[in-house]
Amino acid sequence: MSQTRKITTVLPVAAIEPCLPFWEAIGFKVTVDVPQGDALGFVILSDGATEVMYQSFASIADDVPAIADAARRGHAFLFVEVGDIDAVERALAGQPVVLARRTTFYGATEIGYREPGGHYVTFAQFGEPPQ
C-alpha cells in the first residue's frame, strides 16, 4: 500500500470564472487553466501550500459522462485551517456569510462562507486570534 501524499478537492460548478475572485482575495493564484470552449473548463488555484480545483459541469460531462448528473446535484463543504482569521474575514468582506464568526468548544475561531460556485467554505484558526 502506498502512502497518501495529498488530497485536493475538485469543486464542480456551472462557471469557474465567478469563483476565482473569492480565492484570489485570500492569496490564491491560478496555476493551471484548461479552456472549455469560450470559458474555463478546469483550474487549479494554489496559495503555495494548499490547492483547490474547479471543473465546469460541461467539462465533467465531456470528460466523465457517467458522473455528470452527480456533479450537478452536490455541494462540497470545505474546512480550511488558516493562520489569521481576521485577514480572511477582511479579504472576503461582502461575500455571503453562512456561519457567523464564532468560537467553538474545540478551540477554533471560525467563519463560513458560500463561495460563488455554491459550495460552503469554513475558515478556522486555532488558538488565540491576532490582536
Image (spheres, rainbow, N blue to C red):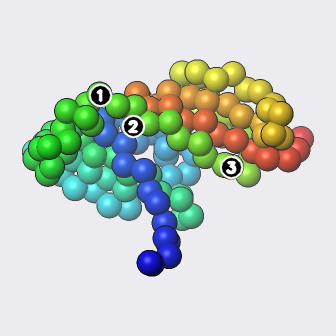
Q: Residues within 10 Å of mark 2 (few under 14, many from 20)?
A: some
For residue 125, the mark is none
**57 relative to 109 in the view: left or right:** left
Is there CB contact under 8 Å for labels 1 and 2?
no
Question: Extreme front residue here?
Answer: 1
Q: Residues within 10 Å of mark 3 (few under 14, many from 20)?
A: some
**Front disc: 1 or 2:** 1
- In this figure, which residue is indicated by the disc labeled 3? 82
**At x 20% / y 42%, what residue is drawn?**
67
**At x 53% / y 59%, what residue is drawn?**
50
Query: Helix, strand or loop at disc 1?
Result: helix
**Front disc: 2 or 3:** 3
Is there CB contact under 8 Å for labels 2 and 3?
no
Query: Helix, strand or loop at disc 3?
Result: loop
Query: What's the CA distance linking mark 1 and mark 2?
Result: 18 Å
- In this figure, which residue is indicated by the disc labeled 1? 73
Frontmost residue, 126 versus 70: 70
**At x 28% / y 46%, what residue is drawn?**
55
Amino acid identity at mark 2: Cys
Q: Earlier in the sequence, mark 2 or mark 3?
A: 2
Query: What's the CA distance linking mark 2 and mark 3?
Result: 19 Å
- Residue 103, image x and y in percent? 81, 31
Frontmost residue, 91 versus 15: 15
Amino acid identity at mark 1: Arg
Q: Is residue 94 positioned above or below 84 on the image?
A: above
Q: Earlier in the sequence, mark 1 or mark 2?
A: 2
- In this figure, which residue is indicated by the disc labeled 2? 19
Whether residue 91 appears in this view of the structure is no
Amino acid identity at mark 3: Val
Q: Earlier in the sequence, mark 1 or mark 3?
A: 1
**104 relative to 111 in the view: left or right:** right
